[in-house]
Amino acid sequence: MMDGSPVDSFGCTVRQRHLSLREAGVVIDEIKKSPKITGYNKVEWTRTKTTFVAEGRGGELSGVCLVDDFHRTWAEIAVVYVLPQYRRAGIGRSLIEAAHASIRQRGKNTLIFFSEPVVRNIVVDLGFKTSSGLTRLSEELKQERWILRHYYPVRWLSNPFRIKEIIRKKFVFDMDLNFECAASLAVRNAPRIVLA
């Protein structure tokens, strides 16, 4: 739902746009408090990644979703975060649905990691294939094994901000990095129309 129509009981709407520097600061500070989300930096939130924002009636930030196009055929729903006062109203679902629809429109496969049962329920409802981890998922999706097992982890870990956050969260929260993951494959090999 990216047309600006209300998506939940708070009257929030989901829009595709980058965060302002102030909004990015709020989101990064909130995510730093969570033992279950690894972070992304201000440049990613404000300029380089696709971002979906849930806004309240007055335009206030209520939730965010960051999409990382990490390969020509894959995009990751990298972060879904709803501010505490807006939770349990369907905002997270609306953000995931908007991000997934955008990825599918671009003909890409979708990857998402999660630790919350509510996210598992959402991705199952959307038809994602769930797995206990990336290694197992890459075995189940043999045609995508190299990308999921080698390319994605190296690219993801090449960001110093994320490495620093993982180390900090391991010490502060004793963070467990055993996330579940899910994938939704784009429809491929559709008939092509050739105009003469």
Image (cartoon, helix red, strand yellow):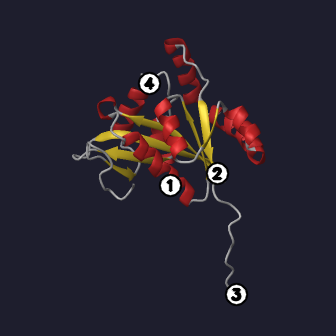
Neighbourhood count class around disc 1 (C-alpha, 10 Å): few under 14, some 14–19, many 20 upward: some
Q: In the rendered image of this protein, does residue 92 appear above or below residue 104?
A: above
Q: Which residue is label 3 attached to? A: 196
Q: Badge 4, how many Cα within 10 Å: few under 14, some, many 20+?
A: some
Q: Amino acid at mark 1?
A: Ala
Q: Which comes before the other along the chain, label 1 or label 2?
A: 1
Question: What's the CA distance linking mark 4 and mark 3?
Answer: 56 Å
Residue that mark 4 sits on:
32
Between tags 2 and 4, which lies in front? Answer: 2
Q: Amino acid at mark 4?
A: Lys
Image location of residue 11, percent across then percent down: 26, 47
- Name the residue at 52% across, 47% down: 126
Say which residue label 2 marks: 185
CA gap, disc 2 and disc 4: 31 Å
Q: Disc 2 residue type?
A: Leu
Element assignment for label 3: loop
Q: Amino acid at mark 3?
A: Ala
Q: Is residue 150 visible?
A: no
Where residue 63 appears, as percent x and y from the top left, is 37, 39
Q: Secondary structure at mark 1?
A: helix
**First in sequence: mark 3 vs mark 2:** 2
